[in-house]
Image: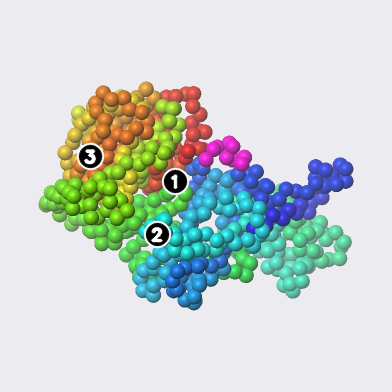
Amino acid sequence: MGHAHSTSRHNGRAGAGAGNGVEPPLPSRFSRFRSRLRLRRDRCGAAGDASESGKGVAADEFAGIARIRIVKAGLRFKDKFFACLSLGERTYRTETTDSTHRPVWNSEKKVVIETNGPHIARISVFETNRFSKNTLVGYCEVDLFDLLTKDLEEEHVEDLALLDPSSSTTTMGTISVSCYIEDPVETEQSFARRVLAIVDYNEDGKLSLSEFSDLMKAFGNGLAVNKIEELFRQADTNGDGIVDMDELAALLADQQEKEPIISNCPVCGESLGKYDKINDMIHMTLCFDEGTGNQIMTGGFLTDKQAAYGWMFKLSEWANFSSYDVGLRSGSTASHILVFDRRTKRLVEEAIDGKIVLSMRALYQSKVGLTLIDSGVKDILKNLSEKQGKKMNSPESAKDIPKFLELFATFNEFFIRQLKPSARPIAHIDDGSIATCAADCRLMAYSSVDESTRFWIKGRKFSIEGLLGADAHHNAFKNGSLVIFRLAPQDYHRFHVPVSGTVEKFEDIPGCLYTVNPIAVNSKYCNVFTENKRVISIISTSEFGKVAFVAIGATMVGSITFVKKEGDYVHKGDEFGYFSFGGSTVICVFEKDAIQFNADLLANSERSLETLVEVGTTLGVSKRNRGLKVSELQKCSIE
């Protein structure tokens, strides 16, 4: 992965040691990369809230461009395979191997690395299927920061263990990858050289005035045309009418910094200048990626699961029977649920059986389904949940527990199992002005009810008063903020206190047991949160005022158990209760202007995108504590 010294720009500038006639060598690309990471981490601690949402890269966040190459895989069985690389909100796919022997791809992709951006990449290997579905056979996660800061040769190949998707303790084989960083200075110059090569018609490494003129015209900048001869003369130091390409590249890079002369990307034609010069350079470098003779991975995917779909899904997309995108999903488009993993800063697709998805769409996303619900389906769901709850509490249910967990007497004992305290450390545990996440879940946070109904909750009758009920509702909650913690069946199903304070009361509200899946929550035909069975607790705090903690039952979850009682003082992070088998939801309501939610949670929620979080990670900060710098907490949202 190379550690050669970066060459200085061809601009006649002297280095720090020029006074004694000796120019000191520049630090290696790895030294500069490490210093950028160290500077940012010293300023901000752990990873923050940057996300790929169409925004430009901040100059002080740009660490460089990494070239990642997936070389080959060593698997236990022989078949045809392809691999996917996922980073942030982008996924890339290799070609399918043309042999049933050991898969060899030599596929590569260049990606932007931000000092505070996504850096945990996932590599997935799929077995191909000629029909509709491909099978995930192994995966691994790699921290690019760790890989890129190793002082290794450019062509160094790292062998990583491929884990079994059904058991992270089982190894399915290995995958070989290489990764190295392009220094920003080198990236600019190498881009200029590659672009200039377009008009080097005779491929002699030199440009004539006419060749250079063609390039200026391709840049789409009328002012650049007037500078053609001037720039050419500056580079043509010996006046022979021929300019060395490296000299011309250095001159062009300097000129681009002083006064941009490229208005349109010469590859895709897109207009430049939307953000700043560094983003223009990044755009053109990634756009003009001719590679190094290896295959370039195919992009345009959000998750590895989308990249792995076969021709039947692609046909359904083309026919508008299905869609795959970030944001609010309704009707037939509610077939795929994407969430943003806060830890890895990567999009992932929620695993739901296709038949269940179809059933929920039919029931919750149509007027026909609404009619069925009103005509007795709600009673069926309630009876089914109660019956399933009794089954999961029976000794016979223990047979569904994996063999290595036979110490549990019933399935519900396994389902509501506790974690070791060290498994979920509580952020800023001694600072009561910082609230933390109440559950391992998919989270949505909104500063007001109006925002929640605009971006997420589509039930026509949703209100804070309807959620809390007349007995628990308080005027202080009017126009308050709320956060939704949605637990899926695979999650740790105990919930914890997000703030420190005294438990004032509990209020039971009977109701239905609709699913809390986004397919139902995003439906305009039912009111999940205000009609489902729920238990409301009011916590009185010194930092946030009153906080309403609402535990909501759902299909297959008829049992909500609290482990605290009225009058108890609870500390942030304390266990508060648990749900029995199934998916469920907690909603916390804060008084108006009591809390400033973390910026990354708000940004994702405004995109109608749930954030996958763990118990104890930061949720927000009290607005009533003037001594805390809110902006700093927003930058360092994950401890």
* Chain-order first, disc 1 or disc 2: 2
Magenta stretch containing residue 353, yes or no?
no
Which residue appears at 37% of the width and 40% of the height?
420
> Disc 2 designates what residue?
165
Q: Above or below — where is 379 with respect to 79?
A: above
Of tags 1 and 3, the one toward the viewer is 3
Magenta stretch containing residue 41, yes or no?
yes
Which residue appears at 62% of the width and 70% of the height?
293
Callout 3 crowding tier (Cα within 10 Å): few <14, some 14–19, many ≥20: some
Viewer-side residue, 219 vs 446: 446
> Disc 3 designates what residue?
560
Question: Taking the image as drawn, is residue 612 in sight?
Answer: yes
**Whole-percent x, y for residue 247 in the image:** 78, 59
* Chain-order first, disc 3 or disc 2: 2
For the record, the magenta segment spans 38-46
Q: Are marks 1 and 3 in contact (CB under 8 Å)?
A: no
Of tags 1 and 2, the one toward the viewer is 2
Instruction: Give amino acid for label 3.
Output: Ile
Residue 267 is left or right of residue 523, and the answer is right
Q: Secondary structure at mark 1?
A: loop
Residue 556 is left or right of residue 14, and the answer is left
Q: Are marks 1 and 2 in contact (CB under 8 Å)?
A: no
**CA–CA distance between discs 3 and 2?**
31 Å
**Whole-percent x, y for residue 524 in the image:** 25, 49
Q: Secondary structure at mark 2?
A: loop
Q: Which mark is residue 342?
A: 1
